[in-house]
Image: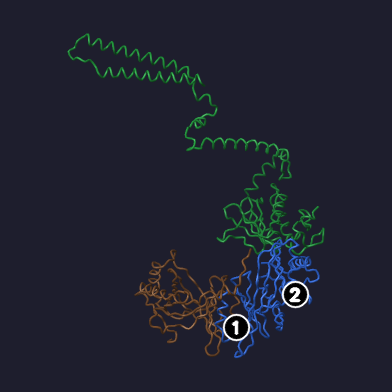
Amino acid sequence: MAENLETVNSALAATQKLRCSVTRVFTHLREGVKSTKGEVSKESMFIRQLQEALTAVTSDFSELEKLSSSLHKFTDGIPMGNSGLLSLDPVQDKTPMYTQLLQSYKWSTKLQSHASLAGAMLTQNSLKRTSVPSGGLSAKRRKTQPTCHATPAHLVDNVVTTVDRSFNDLSLTVNRPQGTGAVLQATVGRTLSAIVILRGLLIERVIVRGYHENLHKDNGTLDLWTPSKYRVFQKLTDHAMAAMLHYHLPHLPEIGIRSFMTWLHSYTTLFSTACHRCGKYLNGNIPPTWRDFRTLEVCHENCRQ
Amino acid sequence: MAIPVNPLSQSTMSSPSMQEYLLQGSILDSALESLLHRLRGLCDNVEGPETFHDHEMVYILRGTPSPAILRARHALDHPNIPWQLRYVGQSEVGDKNRSTLVRSCIDCATSDNLSSFLVEMGFRLDHEYVIKGYLFRKGRMKITVSKLFRVISPGVTEEIEAVSLSHLVELSVVAPAGQDAVGDDMRSFAEHLKPIVQMEKMDPKRL
Amino acid sequence: MGVTCVCQWPVPDNKSVQQVVDMIAKRVELLGSNKSGTFCVDCETYQSSPMMMLQKTVHIIHNSEQPMTSYAVMEGPGSAANCLVADTMFDQIMQRLKGFYMPKKTPKVESKGQHYELGDFNVKIGTVTLGGHAKGILLEIEYTPCVVVLDCWNLLTEFMQGFMASHTPSLPSYLANRQDANYTPMDTIMQYLDHFNTFTGRKVVQQPAR
């Protein structure tokens, strides 16, 4: 760097020198020939002096050229591309851009490494949402699969009405707040109410609230997010999520939705049935919230094992 | 932490008694449109007036020295909102200095078994009517333009007939006692409604 | 607002009301409940004036759980108890009916005390006072997620047995008549009224099903 600095210094000196000589040429030209009487000697002297000045310029120029060629391009040394220029900005206090840039770079590297680790992890333990092995999809199934989340609205309505009719104390109403996706309001007996969000015929999200809790926000739209204030129904929301995954059948979405509703319907007796395992109503001040996915057997969450 | 509340001390003791300042007028049905038009310009309701369709029953409990009268009112177009029970005191119309009729008044929202409750308290239904109309607001003033209907067979609010060929115009404010400046505001507002309607303080005793 | 049972806890002769209240509070706290404030239910009684033909009683009851509400309960011979739910302005209207309904001379009854929360259950331990004198104890046990008495009575009983043991009440007669209806805060008030009536020594009016 030191010798580099020396070269730069001499190059600067050379530039100054060049500037001087160029100025001399122009002053000389500006003064012009002193006498107007056309004396040849004076005229030729003027030309000779001009020639001398021009040679000085050429030599100074070639010297500067020589020096500059010995200087290698400065920015090439920094591997950061344009961002490296930012680091040269002397007014760091005013623009903390460079430090921020470094920070975000560090984060993105970290993110990338974590993501790749997680990716490796997940490929080892794949979460199966279908009973069909992911590799062994037959050509026929692969064709039917994409249709289930794009079921036409009247088909969804049909399925919902048949499910609605098949249970006495389960009532379902369909809403379409965002156009295509159906949102079901389910009321089970006088025990609970639930919001089931569908994508086509697949259940995407379930939230369970008390029978006397509001399903609507103050402005009259469905409240899809606020969890119930009661512990029982918070627990039930968790179980309903598990059930939703269990009954997820992308190639037979109708059966999935019907089994889910059958399961949900079994909660009419949430408060009036004792646990089949321990024979009690309460465990940790919560009634038996678990219903087996196959047998619909009633038990406390803690009595399951 | 819930704040300990003593409901009795909160409501009855501290809340001041409310008074209703009232001016009334009447217009022929043919003048309705021009009055509504004028009110639309004068009042705060930007998107036009609210409409209402109420059923009012006046209950009376006879006794000495004077009978007690309570008014039970409920909206026919919004069956789910609470019933209103209203006590209206003696009007202080005699005072010449006052620009409006002033009377004490208590409004109370109740559940829908109000009429059977009043009957059990010993009240008798004196008369009932259906009232349909428009409601405007201007600051704290309430302006109603409404038509009264007679109920032909008791309790059946579907079969009604108009009492007259005119609309009742009422301008009222319910405010804590002693705020007599309200009356002057109402007077100046009433000036704006001339000559479509002449708002006056009515003396119910004269009728 | 869920199904609620109001019941009386007997005070043995050798103990003061406060001692028993402390004992119950300790039990409830040992179950792991949190104190969540105080509550107060009070009742004022108006009697129809002798001029009137009918002998009627109107109780005005307030519950600090619904601070802006007044419950007016009408009792009279030969008629079912009728409860009007109104806002607190109803108290002022009652005062305007002075000539017809007068406040009873007997002191005001109220039940006042600590409020506990235990999961979805609420327990309130109230000391009943009659004109400032402690008369007894009323417990209020509420199961908030459920609104049908029939559904959760067994569950509620099991919960009450947990800390009340032999004092666990059977289904209150008022609730027995309304087992299948949706529970409302009014039902809690009616239970309190039944108990207040026994404390003040008024003849308990049998309430037929409405």
- Per the rendering, the mark at residue A207 is none
Please tell me which residue lies in front, A37 or A120: A37
Q: Reply above or below: C69 against A86.
A: below
Q: Nearer the viewer, residue C152 or C116?
A: C116
Category of crowding for the residue at label 1, using alpha-carbon neighbours closer than 10 angstroms: few (below 14), some (14–19), many (at least 20): some
> Which hue is chain C drawn in?
blue
Q: CA distance from mark 1 to mark 2?
A: 45 Å
Residue named by callout 1: B119
Q: Colour of chain A?
A: green
- Residue B19: x and y in percent read 47, 77
Give the colour in which the image draws chain B. brown
Amino acid type indicated by mark 2: Ser
- Counting from the top left corner in percent of width and height, residue B89 is at 49, 82
- Depicted C151 relative to depicted A17: above or below: below
User: What is the quadrant of the N terminus of chain B in the image?
Assistant: bottom right
> Mark 2 = which residue?
C16
The residue positioned 27% from the left and 12% from the top of the image is A47
**In which quadrant will I find the C terminus of chain B?**
bottom left
